[in-house]
Image: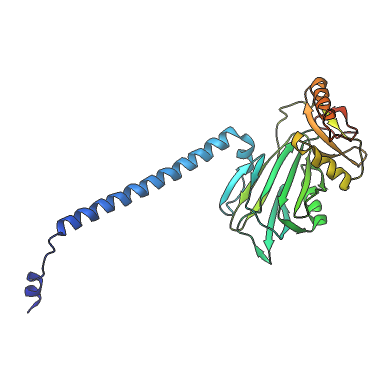
Amino acid sequence: MNGKEHYDNIEIPARLSEVIQHVRHRAQHQKRKKMFWRGCSLLAVCAAMMITINMPGVAQALSDVPVIGPVVKILQVGNGGKPNDGVLLTTSKEADTLNIYFQLEGEHLASAPAYTLDHQVGPNRLIFTFNGVRELDYAKLEKDIKALKNVKDAYRNIILDDSAIRFVVELKDDVDYSVSEYRQPGFIQLKLFSTPKNAEAHRLFFVRSQEMEQDETLALLAEQYNSDGSSIVKTQNGKFAMVIGGFENQTEAEKLLQQIASREEHVQQLFVDSWMSNENPK
């Protein structure tokens, strides 16, 4: 049998037309699927653009940052990362950018460990908490942070969790920031930049403790009032105090103090105090 005879004798499947229709439908479905995901990608880009437009700080932060790896999120307060333990934290700095890296057993983590970022005023400061971190060169961390030109001070907070660390970055006046979380490798990037003056420093009212050395007593105090929004701040004398609030008037601060004083577990002597939004307490 020659080639043509072989071709002419090929048996045509009875369901060939059905198979062809199935293939066509499948191809159209795949095409629509690709178009859908392209549309999603475009929407994601548009969403990122909208976020950037609505958050001038983020736009400024991203204006001159090279693409390093996939960005998980960009935030000014909030949380992120994935639970981990036994993590080593290291840092590097360039210009007014701080990079925070994470390793486990000598390997860079693909994602940052679970963390939270808070922003407080009186003074203007960022509070980073990283969970699962058990090792770090704090001297280098502090040195790298203080080397950033828009930073006023940096210090560590003692907390009652030996698998977590917390440190505070005090910012100078008229400074904005953004925090970007990357993956593969996982790291956090803090970027600081000067901004036009858009808010005058003003007096705020707080419920606070006496100043003291930063030790377990202060950590216990902050833990006790954690649900009230407590934080530990450095005083003008170089010691530390537990503070709650940042109220616009004294009445609100006194109301909170009365509520706290009425609790059975309240034993620490707290009082209402006030200072400027860009200053440290005395």
Q: Residue 177, located in which quarter of the rendered image?
A: top right
Q: Is residue 118 visible?
A: yes
Q: x and y percent of residue 142 in the render? A: 81, 51
On the rendered image, what quadrant is the N terminus found in? Answer: bottom left
Give the answer, above or below, for where 70 lies relative to 204: below
Q: Residue 86, located in which quarter of the rendered image?
A: bottom right
Give the answer, above or below, for where 234 lies relative to 163: above
Residue visible at 74% across and 36% down?
Answer: 227
Q: Is residue 192 visible?
A: no
Give the answer, above or below, for where 197 lies relative to 16: above
Q: Is residue 114 left or right of residue 135?
A: left
Question: For the image shown, how many numbered marks are present on the structure?
Answer: 0
Who is closer to the viewer here, 230 or 51? 230
Q: Is residue 22 left or right of residue 140?
A: left
Q: x and y percent of residue 62 in the render? A: 61, 43
Q: Residue furthest front?
A: 264
Q: Is residue 109 left or right of residue 95?
A: left
Q: x and y percent of residue 149 in the render? A: 77, 44
Q: How is the image coloured?
A: rainbow
Q: x and y percent of residue 26 in the render? A: 28, 53
Residue visible at 62% across and 34% down?
Answer: 56
Who is closer to the viewer here, 145 or 117? 117
On the rendered image, what quadrant is the C terminus found in? Answer: top right
Residue visible at 77% across and 36% down?
Answer: 124
